[in-house]
Amino acid sequence: MLDRNRILKDPEGAERAFRSRGLSVDMTALLGLDAEWFSAVREWEALREKRNSLSSEIGRKKRQNENSDEIESEVRLVNQAITQAEDRKRTLEARREAMWLEFPNLPHESVPVGRDESENREVRRVGGAPSFDFTPKPHWEIGADLGILDFDRAARISGARFSILSGAGARLERALISFMLDIHTNRTPEKSVPYRELSVPYLVLPESLTATGQLPKFREELFYVEADDLYLIPTAEVPVTNYLRGEIVDESTLPLKFCAYTSCFRREAGAAGKDTRGLIRQHQFDKVELVWFSVPERSWEALETLTEDAAGILRRLGLPYRVIELCTGDLGFSSAKTYDIEVWMPSQERYREISSCSNFTDFQTRRGQIRYRRLEDRKVQLLHTLNGSGLAIGRTLAAILENCQTAEGTVRVPEVLVPYMGGATTLTREG
RNA sequence: GGAGAGGUGGCCGAGUGGUCGAAGGCGUCCGCCUGCUAAGCGGAUGUAGGGUCAAAAGCCCUACCCAGGGUUCAAAUCCCUGCCUCUCCGCCA
């Protein structure tokens, strides 16, 4: 949710910011509704004040054994007015709340203005694309040929956009999860504050999804369990960010950094016909997620660090990638600034998103009331949240199959994963 | 799923329908004191929205004692429903 005062102070600026995201917002309607709500609140408060003072007057009289019938009937009248004022306030409040929840975050000033993904800006490339003296196969063919990846049986069990890994494929998935978590929790050296690993619920309450921004706007993207009013998580961002919902933490504990491995569930409602083959776009996929809670002053540098933490996984795996900065038109709903990390996919001869690292500023923390007590003056302030994939497991697995494939149809296991693969250095055909 | 007990501030914990935003303690902050530290002493200390003010402080108003309803002139307090926690039983990986 946006900072109301900030919007009221500079509605033109806000309108420009929305337009840069490709959104036309009727600011007059917005400000009108807000003002109407505000006057209803003031009216209701004034009536409550009147009732409260009359009621305590009754209390005083009763204690002195005086008659209070006259005031009591006066209060009854006031109470009728309160009921009306309350209805009006409630209606307007619901409309206002619904309206504010529909607005996306405002882009940071450093975000390049652009219409869509074609105007994203490449920040850097790391590692050269491997050259093959044969035509590289797509990962689903490699996986099928090796006998470790099966979409047909998955479809029989669950329908389209599901997959089954078997044998070394399943082991490779497990290896990637362990490897990534080990790096982030710093069982390997070099990071000053390691991430704390969390294992979290996969089913969450609607409130949790409202806090992170998936609800109310993106309901159709979510799997929903109606009998219990619970949703399957589309990303670990939801349970991990909500870990601190409604809490006030002390500044001395910051920044708080968490990582979590979870499966993720997405309906991919708007993606019909896109990436129909392979592991790129599945209803269920695995991901290791990184989440930061930061003081506002340090969240922008935190975004750089977070992005590098995620990219560090690709560097260690020896996979070529690039980092791009999303333009205003391509920015996610809750994000103020996003770097996407894209890995090279030889069969497609292009980079594909494997991580998305964002600073949500106070957009999620205002919705979820996640705050901290400032050391300096003991005041309570909203935190900033950030998150990024570190990384998507399925896409990483696909990238390894494709980038490390050989002319013989085998796959070289990245060196850092060998210990996690029981010493295996190559994936070969299995039955 | 059944029975019972509970949900109060950063934490613990009192609270008779009106003077309760709520005793007391812990923690935290500011002083004092003692070579230093600890201890001790004194004071301050909820959140949000609004008003007053040039602004800050201060003062004032409204809301919040799990959530939502209800009773009442008046609810932390009484009633109902839901959620959550704990104990026992049942079931279960």
Image (spheres, coloured by chain):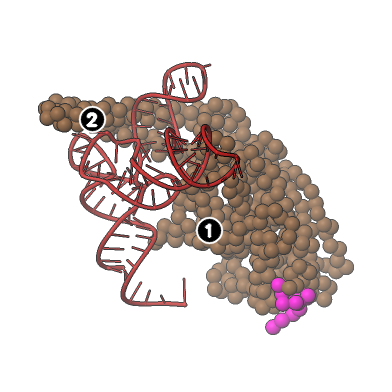
Using the image, determine if residue B3 lies above or below residue A88.
below
Q: Chain of mark 2?
A: A
Spot occupied by residue A361 in the image (x, y as percentages of width and height): 60, 42
Using the image, determine if residue A140 lies above or below residue B20.
below
Q: State the CA–CA distance, disc 1 to disc 2.
A: 50 Å
Of the numbered discs in the image, which one, if any, rests on residue A175? none
The range drawn in magenta is: A420-431
Q: Residue at x 75, y 77 (%)?
A: A423
Marks 1 and 2 share the same chain: yes
Determine which quarter of the picture holds residue A261. bottom right
Q: Which residue lies under the disc numbered 2?
A: A56
Is residue A125 something that shows in the picture? yes
Is residue A180 something that shows in the picture? no
Q: Residue at x 66, y 78 (%)?
A: A167
Q: Chain of mark 1?
A: A
Residue A365 lies left or right of residue A308; in this view the side is: left
The chain that appears brown in the image is A
Of the numbered discs in the image, which one, if any, rests on residue A233? 1
User: Residue lying furthest bottom in this view?
Assistant: A431
Using the image, determine if residue B19 lies above or below residue A133.
above
Classed neighbour count for the residue bearing mark 2: other residues with Cα under 10 Å, few (<14), some (14–19), many (≥20): few
Task: Please identify the quadrant where the C terminus of chain A is shown.
Answer: bottom right
* Amino acid type, residue under disc 2 in the picture: Ser
